[in-house]
Image (spheres, grey):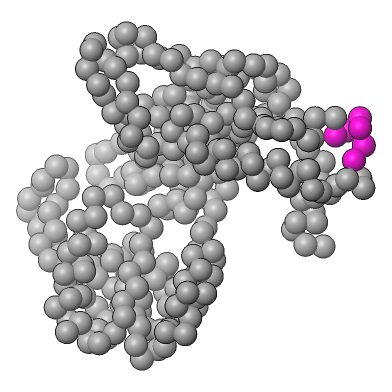
Amino acid sequence: MTNIELMEKALPTAPLKIAALESCKDLAEKVDQYIVSFRKNSLHDFLDPAIYSSYEADSYLAKNSCPRFGSGEAKGMFGESIRGKDLFIMVDVCNYSLTYTVNGHINHMSPDDHYQDLKRIISASTGKAHRVNVIMPFLYESRQHKRTKRESLDCAMALKELENLGVHAILTFDVHDPTIHNAIPGTSFENIFPTYSMLKCFIANEGANIKKDNMTVISPDTGAMDRAIYYANTLGVDVGMFYKRRDHTVVVNGKNPIVQHEYIGGPLENKKVLIVDDMIASGESIIDIIGEISKQNV
């Protein structure tokens, strides 16, 4: 039996509700439209009015908001009942486009602000929802997932906090280090990889141009090497890597500055290069690597 058949015949845990924070409204609307369409076109031969009384709906989006006081403080609230619902809260902690006013000044929402709003909505649902789940495409503080010196373990602390707030499951995408789940072994943690979908699309568009002698997959640092090897093996091409040579005698903004990007791998002359990484923050490293590749690919 296929996964879709299993999903179609599985009984819902409880009536579904999606609480989309302002940062994730657009994505939540697409998810809602898909679920509405899926449920209206499945299970019609198996529907039992008593069990599936709230299975089909025109929308599963819950009315919720996080209004702010003049001081910049906020509160989470629902505009409808969520008692007994299977609640999925969606938040995008990297949406910097949203703003709010603090003492008359405009302030852009940071990941910390989005995370606080998430906790407010969880708090507003406490004791009412049948189950609380969190969908966070970019896991909050996932780049601070391990301790190398005297520093905070922000991601682990955030996960423990969500667990203590009663969150049943956390769904995220391509987390920086999947072993962070070890911080909450008793809570469901779904790390969804988009690798298959990306490769499928890439091969569909570039399949005819992919050859071992004209393409190389490049990892921009040591941390992304496993991902680059998977891409290279799937595409049947060579793999290379850059590593960041740092000046460990100097600390700038909490880290050692990069002196040079050193390349390890075969020649890149006249080859197409596919750079594979998990995220782009400032883009500085990618720009530096493209510059280094351009020197060799002439």
* Residue 119 percent across, percent down from the top left: 48, 24
Left or right of 47: which side holds 222?
left
| Residue 280: quarter of image | bottom left
Q: Residue furthest left?
A: 249
State which region is magenta.
Answer: 47-52
Measured along the vertical axis of the image, is residue 95 above or below residue 287? above
Left or right of 238: which side holds 263?
left
Q: Residue at x 64, y 16 (%)?
A: 80
Of residues 166 and 124, which is closer to you in this image? 124
Measured along the vertical axis of the image, is residue 259 above or below residue 255? below
**Residue 38 appears in the figure:** yes
Q: Residue at x 21, y 67 (%)?
A: 289
Picture mark count:
0
Q: Residue at x 91, y 45 (%)?
A: 46
Q: Residue at x 81, y 48 (%)?
A: 42
Left or right of 63: which side holds 108?
left
Of residues 223 and 131, which is closer to you in this image? 131
| Residue 232: quarter of image | bottom left
Is the N terminus in the top left, top right, bottom left or bottom right quadrant? bottom right
* Residue 49 percent across, percent down from the top left: 91, 32
Residue 193: within the magenta? no
